[in-house]
Amino acid sequence: MSTKAESKKTTKKSGEGFSAEEKAAMKARAQGLKAEARASKNREEGEKAVAAAIAQMAEPDRIMAARLHEIITESAPDLMPKTWYGMPAYANADGKVICFFQAASKFGVRYATFGFQPDANLDDGNMWAASFALIELTAVEEAKIKALVKKAVSG
């Protein structure tokens, strides 16, 4: 159970400003924008930023993010690695994020998320999945992700 002082750090009342999580997210986004500017000009910078983001993750998120990075860069080598809100993401030649990984530990939830943005070519009628919960990556999930990434970048 948290104390009243601890709860003030993570919650806010009307007019009190931003919570600690909101401030951390804004700081990560500002750092991400700087990294994006460097990464969009240089693949090596993007790789460094993604590697640093993955290195900061707790297990098992770190293992999943590292394997997803391998899968995505193999399946869609033209996507540019970058960070997006402090998490690994992969953008097209126009700089638009196509897919991303969100660590479970970042928000204290029970599963990580692998998702796609609107510029991904995943349209399938009037409704399709745009993000997926990940508990573990097995060969089955890896095959599905490879196919989705390839479809997302298809023209």
Image: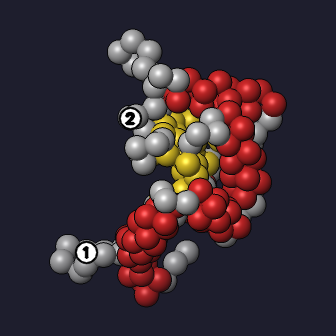
Residue extending furthest right?
139
Q: Who is closer to the viewer here, 17 or 44?
A: 44
Vertical placement of residue 121 versus 88, above or below = above
Residue occupying the point 42% across, 20% down: 123
List the single residue furthest toward the front. Answer: 41
Tag 1, which secondary structure?
loop
Helix, strand or loop at label 2? It is loop
Which circle, 1 or 2, is nearer the viewer? 2
Q: Residues within 10 Å of mark 1 (few under 14, many from 20)?
A: few
Q: Is any part of residue 40 visible from this angle? A: yes
Q: Position of residue 67 (x, y in %)?
A: 75, 47
Q: Is residue 133 above or below residue 145?
A: below
Residue behind mark 2: 118
- Residue 13 badge: 1
Q: Position of residue 44 (x, y in %)?
A: 63, 61
Would you identify the image quadrant in which residue 147 lies?
top right
Q: Amino acid at mark 2?
A: Pro
- Looking at the picture, does residue 82 appear above or below residue 15? above
Q: Earlier in the sequence, mark 1 or mark 2?
A: 1
Going by the numbered disc 1, the residue's amino acid type is: Lys
Name the residue at 24% across, 80% down: 16
Distance between mark 1 and mark 2 Cα atoms: 34 Å
Tell me where residue 132 appears, x and y as whole percent: 56, 36
- The image shows residue 122, relative to residue 5, as above or below, that is above
Colouring method of the image: secondary structure
Quarter-wise, where is residue 148 in the image? Answer: top right
Q: Which mark is residue 85?
A: none
Q: Residue at x 43, y 39 (%)?
A: 117
Q: Quadrant of the N terminus?
A: bottom right
Which residue occupies the foreground of this view, 148 or 19? Answer: 148
